[in-house]
Amino acid sequence: MARAWADVDLDAVAHNIRVLKEHVGSSRLCAVVKADGYGHGAVPVGRAAVAAGADWLAVAQVHEALTLREAGVDAPLLVLSEPRPDELDTVVSLEARVTVYTPETVALLGDAARRHAGSARVPVHLKVDTGMRRVGVAPGDAVALAKVIADHPNLELEGICTHFPVADEPGRTFTGQQIERFEAVLGDLRSAGFEPPLRHAANSAGALCFPEARYDLVRCGIAIYGIPPAPALEGLLDLRPALRLVSEVSFVKEVPAGEGVSYGLHQQTPRDSIVATVPIGYADGVFRALPLAGGEVLIHGQRRRMIGVVTMDQLMVDCGPTGPSGDAVRRGDEVVLLGGQDAERITPDDWATRLGTISYEVVCAIGPRVERRYRRS
């Protein structure tokens, strides 16, 4: 009964995992499935990724880890941000790896580990802020916090990591500076007697563009869904898009030339036009301003301009002039908003470029009313 759906090709996910595994060589591959698998579905994508050879999975929040575990996904699982204090008992019970960067969380995590892990040691990954300025311990404080972790009888310093904000712009020198800072921290840790077995820094863009940053593990998110980390990086690897966002024509009408369409009447029909209504809106992740920025859909394999702002539940499409047509648009015709139809394709980067954003936001915005339909050959 869905009025809009996302066709998710799990074979494409598996293909992308294999391509990335080959590209990063001996480094382990951690498939990032946070934000419900970037809108694709964390559990199906996580299962497909592991089956195709992903060594680890990663999420941002503890409830995302819980969802995977409750679905029976038992792969090594990394939580990328510090949990809240009230989540620490849960994260220990899930046997997840925990990212930390403050002494307070380390102490509370140690208490939770003592309560729940018994003689086992909870693996911890220490995050260092080498320039993102979001989270992470300062480089000069990393050794001291590593010592607190290593000295705790219920914690294990399994990993040391950082994150790159501009790896998708390989012409900039900042990522190289971050790698130098990270190497300096690794040297300080070695001098203090600490050598965590897992060092990781590279996101999808880092894995593609900075071989020296692949270390022991890479954390690939957007690339496993077949979307380049930035338009300039398209074609570096044979990545296959995994998602089509699809709806159908629900109503067709003739609108005279010069008539305003949708809220605000911001756009007018340029001629006597056939206008189709499509039952998907901004509540489903289609940005309200996309038609004003020249957004298009595919119907009968042809690009057709949206017209008028997207409403909460519906949008309108200019399907051309009135009059006899052998390619008339009719109720029930398939409408592709993202993905391919015949020889044409609309990508998340197409939307992102028009809207001044990034492809990540486009796919993550696809809402829960959009039914996910999974297919494998």
Image (cartoon, helix red, strand yellow):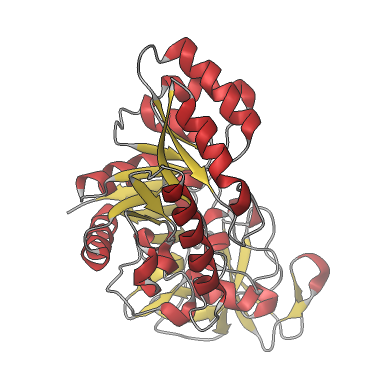
Residue 62, visible in the rendered structure: no
Say which quadrant the C terminus sits in: bottom left
Residue 194: name its quadrant. top left
Rendered residue at 54%/31% (across/down): 148
Residue 356 in the image, given as x and y percentages of width and height: 65, 74
Looking at the image, residue 146 lies above or below residue 299: above
**Measuring 54% from the left and 71% from the top, which residue is drawn there?**
177
Residue closer to the observer: 340 or 304: 340
Position in image of residue 288 (x %, y %): 69, 64
Vertically, is 200 above or below 277? above
In front: 298, or 223?
A: 223
> Where is 130 relative to 304, above or below?
above
Q: Residue furthest front?
A: 191
Q: Residue at x 54, y 79 (%)?
A: 173
Examine the image and state in which quarter residue 17 appears.
Answer: bottom left
Q: Total of numbered circles in the picture?
A: 0
Query: Which residue occupies the foreground of this view, 219 or 127?
Result: 127
Q: Is residue 97 left or right of residue 86?
A: left
Q: Is residue 350 visible?
A: yes
Whole-percent x, y for residue 368 in the image: 53, 43
Q: Is residue 128 found left or right of 71 in the rendered image?
A: right
What residue is drawn where x is 46% and y is 44%? 192
How far across and how far down the image is residue 373, in percent? Answer: 35, 48
